[in-house]
Structures are given as C-alpha cells and as structure tokens.
Image (tube, rainbow, N blue to C red):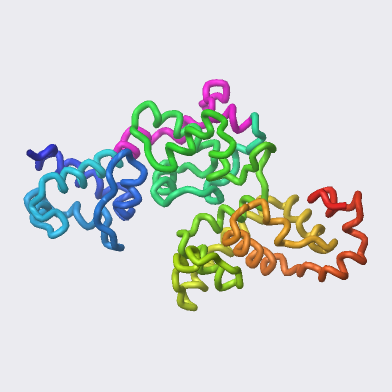
Amino acid sequence: MAKFTSTEWDEIRKKFRHSIMAATPLTSLAQNLDTEEWPHSGEEEKPSKYIEFSYDELLMMPEIAGNAAKADHLIGILKETLAFDDPFGDMVAQVEETAAKDNPILKTLARLNIPATYPMALAKFSEGTRIVCASEGVKTIGEFANLGQQMSTRVVLGGDFRNALNALTHGDEEGIGQFLPFRKGTSGLHLAEAIGLLAGGLPRPEQLALAKAYGTKLNPADSAAAKTLTKEQQEKIEAGLRTSLAAALEWFKDQKEALLKLVEGGGTYERYFVVINDPAREAIAVKLTAAALKVAAKPAAAAASSGEQKKGGLFSRLFGRG
C-alpha cells in the first residue's frame, strides 16, 4: 500500500519547483537525511527529472516501474528536503539575535578559538549540506552553528550536517577536524589542514589519481582505486583546487607568510604538510601550494649551510629539530 497519495505528491512537486534543491542530485539529498540511498545514479537523477509528472505518470517511469514503495521513497526524500526550505526562510535574520550563551556550538567555537567568521566555502562539507546552507544564505561557520541549533529541534538531520553539529556541540576535536582545519590538542585553525581539507573534498579516486600523477608511490590497493584522468579532467580539477587554495591563502595571511619564511629558510613543503597524515592529500597540497607561492624549497645541502636548521632557529622551533 502506498504511503503517500497523489494529492500529497502534487503539493510536494509544486513546492519543489521553487526550491534551490530541485537541481541537486537525489543521492546527495538522501545522504543528508536519515533514509536509504537513492538507488539510481547519473547526472539526470535530480528532483527536476520527476516533479513535472503526475503521480500516475510517476509510477509509469522506468525508475519507479509501478512500484509504489519506490515512489514513496522518492516522495519521502523530497518531503524531508522541503523541511529545510519551508520553516527557515527567516532564520538567517535570527543569526545576530542568537546569543552565544544559548548556543553550545558557539561556546565550543569560542573555547577552541575557532573564528565564527570562517567561511563555509573553505570547510569540508558534502554538496547536499552546502546547498542547504546556500538556500538559507549561510556563509560562515558561526551562521551554520545557529542554523543547526534551530533546525535540530524541527528537522531530522543526517549526513555530515548532523556529524558536524554533534562534533561542535560536544567539543569532539577529532570530529571537528573532519570538516574544519582544526588540529587536535591545539586551538585556532591551521593553514596546512585547510589545504588538506580542500584536497579531501575530492572523491577519493580523484585524490589518488592526482597524487599518482604527481609522482607519489601508492600502495597496490590505492593504485588500483585511483581514477584514470584525462588531461582535460585533471586540468579542470586542478583549476578548481587553485581557486579554493587562493581563498585559503588569503584567509590565512599570517600563516602563509610564516610558510614562505620557512621555505626560504630551508624548510620543506613536505614537512609542513605532514600533519595532514595522508600521503595522497599531502602530495596534492605540496604540489599546488609550491606552484601558488612560487618559492622552491632549498636543496638539503644549501639548507644545512644556511644555519636555519640550527637549534633555536625558526625550523627547529616549528618542527623540533636541533
């Protein structure tokens, strides 16, 4: 027996015509809800593909194939997604009014010295979460905190949206580091991790493909998992990363200057990015940052003779060498 009626479907599809999420992949929408994955993939698998059809026409589509349960699954995804749109149109206006003392997430940000103004664009979130936030005009992690506080009482949250809110609410430093450039056991945000998260935002097969292209020796499993990229595909991915990297370097101006001094004094990009703790993402960070800053690391012999690695120097203070 069908869970949803044709009347409910007509109401939902009418509302979805005006939703920013109509062009979002159904797989992404499902990932951000506590529901089963949408079983079909492909660029055309978006709400916009289905909402122009009546309920009877929907049941005749090959993807539904007369199966009311499949139709219910689709309608359920769209209905839950609409919950992000409908009740919260004025939520961004409330951001300024939500006091830190009433929001445990903002308390965590303050305690860990994480700027509430840190851009969402530089955080590591799924496409579904980004679209939800964009639909509400949320651009910073502080606004995300307020949005999440309001939504958590009215909407069933899933995916990385829920994970991020849980980590921030409970001060889970390791969890916070999954989406913000936070280093466990420290305070504030860090450029090295920020660049690592940019690379981490790529699908894993693409990360491995870039690392392989940059000369990184991968283990057999990673080598097999690496996607085969055409020259055009690689250039497109790199162009996107360079744009995000420029924004990160602009945000972390002081740390960028410290990195420049480090490399000019004999330090290496490889050592700087070792905190990422993932060879593939480290390789991507090294390659793109070196190209962006256009400062080559000194050869080992020159670095040693420069005296910068002696105990008490900048290099030893940063990395504990002496």
Q: Residue 244 appears in which quarter of the rendering?
A: bottom right
Residue 229 is situated, as x and y percent measured from the top left of the image, at: 46, 73
**Residue 274, placed above or below residue 118:** below
> Does the magenta segment cover residue 300?
no
Give the residue displayed 13% in from the left and 37% down from the top.
3
Left or right of 68, for residue 153 = right
Give the residue displayed 78% in from the left and 54% down from the top.
258
Q: Residue 288 appears in which quarter of the rendering?
A: bottom right
Q: Main secondary structure of the magenta part?
A: helix
Q: Residue 150 appears in which quarter of the rendering?
A: top left
Give the residue displayed 32% in from the left and 38% down from the top.
34
Give the residue displayed 42% in from the left and 41% down from the top.
136
Q: In the picture, which quadrant includes the N terminus?
A: top left
Viewer-proximal residue among 74 and 204: 204
> Does the magenta segment cover residue 93?
yes
For this orientation, the residue located farthest to the top is 101
Residue 74 is situated, as x and y percent measured from the top left of the image, at: 21, 47
**Residue 258, placed above or below residue 221:** above
Left or right of 310, for residue 49 = left
Image: magenta residue range: 82-110
Viewer-proximal residue among 124 and 84: 124
